Image (cartoon, grey):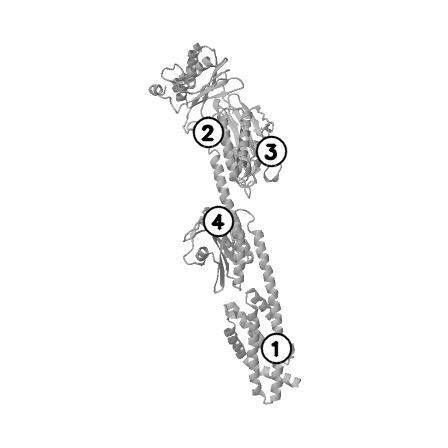
């Protein structure tokens, strides 16, 4: 009977082959009505239609050729379609229901055909039972293979998603640079997840504003990425990073756009239009919306589904944390750098002792701004103090500490202390600052304050430089013959240790010598040891250069291949000048009041020789008062010195106060006494007490400096600031 039933079943199949299109249409109508998720878009519709056709034609053809009904196998492409359904996120139940519903429609077609071909009830019954067994076995095999392939693809996709999320954690946020972090997000998504990716951040957030912005939202496009295997021209254009000028441009989201809704609500969305599909995902971290990312597909046959949206949200969440960290770091670094820049000298004062060029480079990467600093401080006697220091650590605290130390150095320099004594007082300042920091319970713990410093005083009259260092790197000197060498100075302890002495050393620096002061970030950059860095520095200093500024650039280019050093770098170059006999006049005076008159006459003759007659009146009064005080209150020997100061370049060059072609005069009177003169207001009938008040009125600056033995009272007269008229002087006295 089985043979007869199989033969008759084969005959029925052959009869139905010409009507296969009708069966296919019936199955299609049934599935469209019962499983609409299989017809959501054109690609899924095509795939479902092909699947129905292959199953119907395969069954009819196989049975019509006399194949064993129990051995019929689903078409090979059925497994591939199951995998594609899994990739599209279609539920496995939709595939199983499609098999069952299709089975029912085809069975109805076979059963309806049996009475037309035979009236034998036993044969109809046997064929019907055989047909049911065949259909059940066929659907079971197709379902088993489909579920297995579906689950394998689901597991593979799950592993891929987990791997991609893990990869996002590793590849996004490798630096604290905002642009690079957003580009890492775009590159990762374009490589694995999208045909085109754009990343826009809120302009207010980039400017450091934490408050939410009102609509319309102003954005800046920082990154974009595209698949490398796209259309050659379009893909190449989209894959290029956003140019700097484009990142600086601000654009707004159209009202009601997916991006505007994402920024306003913080909710992601999925969109499909024809063959294009895209996801809009806000970048949010720590309760703040930073921007929005758009992932687009226009070539992938599988549009984005809900699982893709979830994956995009996970990637965006990791990226948002990295972007937020980068923004916080950038804002903190900008604040610290602004503080650092504000605490460094904006320009160096024009003076006769040295020609200077300075550079400061903050550390790159995660280190941030540190406490390196330099300074050029004019001193009395046409001398100049050159300072370079380095505070341990980075960030705002280091920059603030640097500012306090620089202020302390300037204050101590005004006292005309020798370098070793100045470092001793500065050491006390650091110890006091550290104690204040540790005693403040509201202050964030920042560890002990440590710093190094090199303080040098150059005297252009003697052509000598006195230096002392506190744990700082040795300076380098380039002679006029092009030989560069380290100045051998006692190391001295770093600032903040206390109780240890500092030692000063004097070195002769002839006219045209080049003195280089720097921090260790310059010579220890990029992993090479200090000896290699010093050798490179000496070589760079010896190279011919048009100006001192060019020499600075040459040194930085040679020792710092990139503009983002690992540590802060401060560099101060000073080319020495000397003041010879043509700019200095010295007289030894007798300790006798009668010496005042000849001293005034000598000064008048010298000013005439120098072409400074306009300063004769003020200089005569100042010299008279200073010499009189030295004779009356000081001890011999007494010495008068005049120093002519002013710009060393040609006409039109401004001085420290911005006056072009300004010339100045320093009047100094030295004696062996230790008493310090003080400025006071004389009473009406006092015979004395008006001399220093007169000096203060006539001079641009005046003061007293002490030496190992004795003192020097000095006054600086400036041609650009003429002396007050006699009536005004009388009123002031």
Query: Residue sitting at 60 percent across and 64 percent down?
Result: 153
Q: Which residue is mark 2?
A: 349
Judge the density around disc 1: few (<14), some (14-19), many (≥20) Cα neighbours within 10 Å.
some
Please report whichever mark, 4 or 1, sits nearer to the chain's N-terminal start.
1
Quarter of the picture holding the N terminus:
bottom right
Quick one: 55 or 698, which is closer to the camera? 698
The answer to whether marks 1 and 2 mark residues whose Cβ atoms lie closer than 8 Å is no
Q: CA distance from mark 1 to mark 2?
A: 98 Å
Please report whichever mark, 3 or 2, sits nearer to the chain's N-terminal start.
2
Q: Which residue is mark 3?
A: 534
Q: Element type at marker 2?
A: loop
Q: Which residue is mark 4?
A: 243
The answer to whether marks 3 and 2 mark residues whose Cβ atoms lie closer than 8 Å is no
Q: Which residue is mark 1?
A: 136
Judge the density around disc 2: few (<14), some (14-19), many (≥20) Cα neighbours within 10 Å.
some
Please report whichever mark, 4 or 3, sits nearer to the chain's N-terminal start.
4
């Amino acid at each position: 009977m089985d043979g007869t039933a199989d033969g008759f079943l084969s005959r029925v199949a052959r009869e139905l082959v010409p009507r296969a299109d009708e069966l296919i249409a019936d199955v299609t109508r049934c599935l469209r009505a019962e499983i609409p998720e299989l017809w959501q878009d054109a690609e899924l519709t095509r795939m479902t239609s092909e699947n129905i056709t292959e199953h119907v034609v395969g069954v009819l053809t196989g049975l019509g050729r006399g194949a064993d009904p129990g051995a019929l196998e689903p078409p090979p492409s059925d497994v591939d379609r199951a995998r594609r359904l899994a990739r599209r996120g279609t539920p496995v139940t939709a595939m199983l229901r499609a098999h069952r519903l299709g089975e029912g429609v085809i069975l109805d077609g076979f059963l309806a055909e049996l009475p037309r071909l035979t009236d034998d009830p036993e044969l109809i019954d046997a064929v019907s039972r055989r047909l049911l067994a065949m259909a059940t076995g066929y659907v079971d095999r197709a379902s088993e293979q489909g579920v297995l392939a579906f689950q394998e693809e689901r597991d593979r996709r799950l592993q891929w998603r987990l791997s991609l999320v893990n990869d996002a954690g590793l590849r996004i946020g490798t630096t604290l640079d905002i642009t690079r972090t957003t580009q890492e997000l775009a590159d990762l998504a374009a490589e694995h997840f999208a045909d085109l990716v754009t990343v826009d951040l809120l302009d207010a957030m980039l400017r450091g504003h934490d408050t939410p912005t009102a609509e319309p939202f102003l954005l800046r496009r920082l990154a974009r990425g595209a698949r490398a295997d796209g259309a050659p021209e379009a893909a190449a254009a989209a894959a290029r990073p956003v140019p700097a000028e484009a990142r600086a441009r601000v654009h707004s989201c159209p009202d009601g756009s997916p991006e505007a809704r994402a920024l306003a609500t913080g909710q992601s969305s999925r969109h499909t239009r024809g063959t294009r599909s895209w996801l809009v995902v806000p970048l949010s971290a720590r309760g703040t919306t930073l921007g929005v990312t758009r992932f687009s597909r226009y070539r992938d046959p599988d549009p984005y589904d809900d699982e893709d949206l979830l994956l995009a949200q996970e990637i965006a969440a990791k990226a948002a944390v990295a972007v937020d960290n980068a923004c916080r770091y950038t804002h903190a670094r900008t604040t610290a750098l602004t503080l650092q820049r504000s605490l460094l000298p904006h320009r160096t004062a024009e003076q006769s002792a040295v020609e200077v060029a300075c550079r400061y480079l903050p550390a790159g990467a995660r280190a941030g701004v540190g406490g390196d600093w330099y300074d050029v401080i004019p001193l009395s006697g046409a001398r100049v103090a050159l300072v370079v220091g380095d505070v341990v650590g980075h960030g705002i605290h280091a920059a603030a500490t640097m500012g306090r130390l620089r202020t302390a150095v300037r204050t101590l320099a005004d006292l005309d202390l020798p370098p070793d004594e100045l470092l001793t007082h500065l050491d006390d300042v650091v110890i006091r600052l550290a104690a204040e920091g540790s005693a403040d319970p509201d202050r964030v713990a920042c560890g002990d304050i440590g710093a190094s410093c090199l303080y040098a005083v150059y005297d252009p009259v003697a052509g000598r430089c006195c230096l002392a260092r506190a744990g700082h790197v040795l300076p380098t000197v380039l002679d006029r013959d092009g030989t560069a060498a380290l100045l051998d100075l006692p190391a001295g302890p770093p600032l903040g240790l206390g109780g240890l002495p500092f030692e000063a050393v004097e070195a002769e620096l002839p006219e045209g010598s080049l003195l280089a002061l720097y921090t260790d970030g310059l010579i220890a950059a990029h992993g090479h040891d200090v000896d290699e860095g010093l050798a490179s520095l000496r070589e760079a200093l010896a190279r011919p250069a048009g100006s001192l500024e060019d020499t600075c650039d040459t040194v930085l280019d040679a020792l710092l291949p990139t503009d983002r050093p690992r540590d802060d770098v401060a560099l101060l170059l000073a080319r020495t000048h000397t003041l010879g006999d043509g700019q200095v006049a010295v007289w030894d005076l007798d300790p006798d009041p009668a010496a005042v008159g000849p001293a005034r006459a000598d000064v008048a003759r010298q000013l005439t020789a120098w072409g400074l007659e306009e300063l004769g009146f003020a200089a005569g009064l100042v010299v008279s008062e200073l010499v009189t005080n030295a004779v009356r209150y000081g001890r011999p020997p007494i010495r008068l010195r005049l120093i002519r100061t002013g710009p060393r370049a040609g006409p039109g060059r401004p001085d420290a106060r911005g006056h072009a072609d300004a010339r100045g005069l320093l009047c100094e009177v030295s004696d062996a006494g230790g008493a310090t003169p003080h400025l006071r207001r004389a009473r009406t009938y006092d015979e004395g007490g008006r001399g220093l008040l007169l000096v203060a009125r006539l001079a641009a600056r005046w003061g007293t400096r002490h030496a190992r033995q004795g003192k020097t009272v000095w006054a600086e007269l400036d041609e650009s600031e003429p002396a007050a008229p006699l009536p005004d002087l009388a009123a002031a006295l």
